Image (cartoon, rainbow, N blue to C red):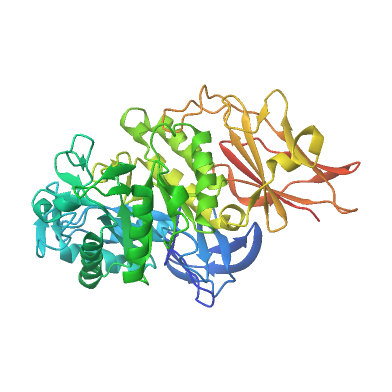
Amino acid sequence: MPELLPTKVSYTPGEPVKVEVRGLEAPAAATVYHLGDPVTTVEVVADGIVDFGPLDPGGYGVELGASRTAVEVTGDRRAGLRYGFVADYRPDRDLDAVTDNLRRLHLTAVQFYDWAYRHADLLGGGDRYDDALGQPVSLDTVASLVKACHQVGADALGYAAVYGVGRDEWPDWQHRALLQPSGEPYGLGDFLDLVDPSAPDWLAHFTGDLRAAVSRAGFDGFHLDQYGYPKRAVRPDGETVDLAEAFGSLIDGVRAELPEARLVFNNVNDFPTWRTGAHPQDAVYVEVWPPHVTLDHLADVVRRARAAGQGKPVVIAAYQHVYDSASTEASDLATALTMATLFSHGATHLLAGEADRILVDPYYVRNHRTEASTAALLKRWYDFLVEHAELLLPATIADVTGSYTQVYNDDCDVTYAGVEVADAAQPGAVWRRVTEASGRLVVHLVNLTGQTDALWDAPRETPGDPGPAVLRVRRTGANLPRVRVADPDRGARLVDVPVRIDGDHAVADLPAPHLWQLVLIDPT
């Protein structure tokens, strides 16, 4: 099949939306759809760039025969965050495959992991050096990768640990150490010790390094990392440091010194999301670890992050270690159910990056090369995310499951013959959730039949077939609601299903879901 690649990861209102066609064997029509309705069609006669002209703000699907992609049009590029990564800065590396992947997956920002010379001396190695763990880095390659991101409309965010100091720099900063009860400094492995991130002298040094990195490499902002510990510690001068407060002060300080930068702070295992979420950063980002091991745990983390962020986009770093120990098929199913949970609850997933890699380890250099099935899965699901973003991600979306479903409410629900519908991620059931998005109802159906547990980072069994469902929704007035259905694996474009009257309710038969089915209900 031909491949469709948007020329950019996102477009602005008034800007022509352009899609590159590769591998076309015969002339065909390319059609743009918004929530399943056709918007415009262009005849394509050969490989090259297809210009659809300007489109209104929103997410769109683009189809040419059986080939698909998606495009986003937005007036605020930082209102959402689809996050990727790079971790290879060797001299003269190829960049085209990286930008193709950014376009293919619509990644709007890229974390430049471990690009710096040292954690407490970002640019001290000259133009070429080995990083703190021995990986070769060319600053010219870093700058070229930044420019490559800009060419396709993505932001480049440099990784910066907010309180890590290496052995060579430690004599200058040990007076700001975070001390264990034994008196030894907290550290990471055998190569970093930790300092108070809010200490004025450290903060001045840290922000100065960040400004220099913007000047040298061209970064648009920074990924501000921590390690999740300690929660509280004492400095050598006897001062007690509350790290939740200190991290908030650090974010404030970086924002003050770099007012235009895109900032993403890592709330490791949800610490301290409740405190940092309201501070001036551009997303609420959480890296999850045990005890956050189930799909329900992921959903709860997203709910807390959305509440704390006060409208900021939410990104969850959920590394799929499962690929290291299970088959690709079982691991792909785990990844899909992870994405279904995150996307349906209003978050995106840091997983994909480089040209063909996904994250299976917190040390991003230790990544996993994707098999063809995984690459195809990511493309389908990231397209689906972009195409239906207005039904998934806005901060105004409300969870109304408890207000609409089951017998007492009797406003909107689904039933399957012989398969339970559950309000939580229950193995063997279909996990049902209902949200309200700009006056519409959205029903999310996640298929957990065939599973014996609800772990997100574990091999998954072949999903069971719950069969078709019956949707019942209370009518508004005499009109029938419009009901549309989409599934990233079985039919990504929203299509109408017939609706019939049953007293005060409308009834529709829904096709069986594969892993995640989205049902859109327009009440009138």
Q: Quadrant of residue 362?
A: top left
460 left or right, relative to 138: right
The answer to whether 210 is drawn above or below residue 426 in the figure is below
Identified at 65% across, 50% down, the residue is: 398
Q: Nearer the viewer, residue 22 or 205?
A: 205
- Tell me how many marks there are: 0
| Percent x, y of residue 364 | 27, 46
Q: Quadrant of residue 344?
A: top right
Identified at 50% across, 27% down, the residue is: 462
| Percent x, y of residue 262 | 38, 65
418 left or right, relative to 213: right
The answer to whether 171 is drawn above or below residue 288 in the figure is below
| Percent x, y of residue 486 | 62, 47
| Percent x, y of residue 321 | 34, 34
Residue furthest bottom as drawn: 14
- Residue 100 in view of the camera: no
Q: Quadrant of residue 213?
A: bottom left
- Residue 443 in view of the camera: yes
Q: Quadrant of the C terminus?
A: bottom right
Q: Nearer the viewer, residue 402 or 18?
A: 402
Identified at 46% across, 67% down, the residue is: 77
Q: Nearer the viewer, residue 418 or 30?
A: 418
